[in-house]
Each structure stands twice: as structure tokens, then as C-alpha cells.
Image (cartoon, grey):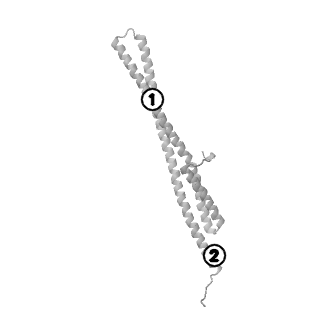
Amino acid sequence: MAEVEIPNNEELNEIKGKTFTRRVALVTALYAVFLAVTSLGGSNAMKETLLAQQQASDQWSFYQAKVVREHLYRSHKLKMEVELLEKKASMKPEVRERFESLLKNMDAEEARYKTEKKDIEKQAKFFEKERDHNRSKDPYFDYAEVLLQIAIIMASVAILSTSRPVFIFSVFAAAMGCLLGLNGFLLIFRIPFFD
């Protein structure tokens, strides 16, 4: 009969410990991948927020310039209308025609600036919506990063202590972090105190 060597309990516990350690290490590597993706998402959301804010500010500056030009044309037009009323009788016909032509041009320019500023205002409001949308994503990424970092730390502690409860806690923290990170990308739900 062949001899069968039965491993002792210490060897079995060591093999179990190595298996647990390898599995936790692999899961920890996955946590790190999710952390990297979440960090990238948060960074991009902040960049998009800043870019949209800059574009909105540029549009509002452009809008303000159009408003100033519109008012400038309006004030010159009103001044010329008063002058035309005062001196209409004493003006030569060609001078009066020139005044009336200039008034029509000023009126057209004022109307053009009024129309252009409306388009610029729409664009500025669009950029503000983009800014607000990206800004609302950022807290989800921030909290997701924190939870994933906690999960990595707790998984490391689980490896050192070969503690399944600590590992389960790390899985829970990672799951919450992944959920918040996914929500940062998709904004499926909103948490009131994040906004």
C-alpha cells in the first residue's frame, strides 16, 4: 500500500493564507484601476468646468461690448434726431438727406447689435449650463476617490492580518466608490448635499 502524506495544519493554514493573500491582492489591483479611472474622470470634469467658465466669461464680455456699442449708436442717433429737429428748416436739402441717411444707418447698426447680443447671450448661457453640469459631477468623483483609497488601504490591512471582515469592508467601500464614480460619469442620481 502506498503511503499518503497528510499535510499538517500549519501547512494547510499557510496555503490558505497564500490563496487569500493572492485573491485580495488581485482585487486590490482592480480597486487601483477603478481609482485611476475615477481620478481621470474627476480631473476631466474639473477641466471642463474651468473651460466652460472661461468660455462663458468670454461670451459675457463680448455681450457687454455689443451692449455698449448698441447704446453708443442709440445715443448718437438720438442726438442727431434732436439736431435734425432743431435745424431742419435751416438745413440745405443735401445736408438733411445726409443726416437722414446717417440716422437710418445708425438705426440699422443699433438693430444689428441688438440681434447679435441675443445670440451671444444664448451661447453664454449654454456655456454656463455646461459649467454647472460638469461642476455637479466633481463631488461624486471626489468621494469615489476617497472610498477607493480607503478600500485599497483596508485590503492591504486584510492581507497583513488575513482578516476576512476587513476584506469585506474594503469590498463594500470599493463598491460604494465605484457606484459614486460611475455616477460622476453618468449623473444617474443626485445627492442633495453634493450640489
- Going 48% across and 35% down the picture, which residue do you hit? 122
- Going 62% across and 79% down the picture, which residue do you hit? 11
Residue 44 is marked as: none
Residue where numbered disc 1 is placed: 115
Real-space Cα distance between discs 2 and 1? Answer: 80 Å
User: Which of the pair 133/80 is nearer the observer?
Assistant: 133
User: Which of the pair 79/12 is nearer the observer?
Assistant: 12
Q: What element carries label 1?
A: helix
Please tell me how crowded label 2 is: few (under 14), some (14-19), or many (20+) other residues with Cα within 10 Å: few
> In the rendered image of this protein, does residue 182 appear above or below residue 131?
below
Please tell me how crowded label 1 is: few (under 14), some (14-19), or many (20+) other residues with Cα within 10 Å: few
- Going 61% across and 74% down the picture, which residue do you hit? 16
> In the rendered image of this protein, does residue 128 appear above or below residue 5?
above
Residue 85 location (% of width, % of height): 43, 12
Residue where numbered disc 2 is placed: 13
Numbered disc total: 2
Residue 163 location (% of width, % of height): 65, 67
Q: Nearer the viewer, mark 2 or mark 1?
A: 1
Q: What's under tag 1, amino acid-wise?
A: Thr
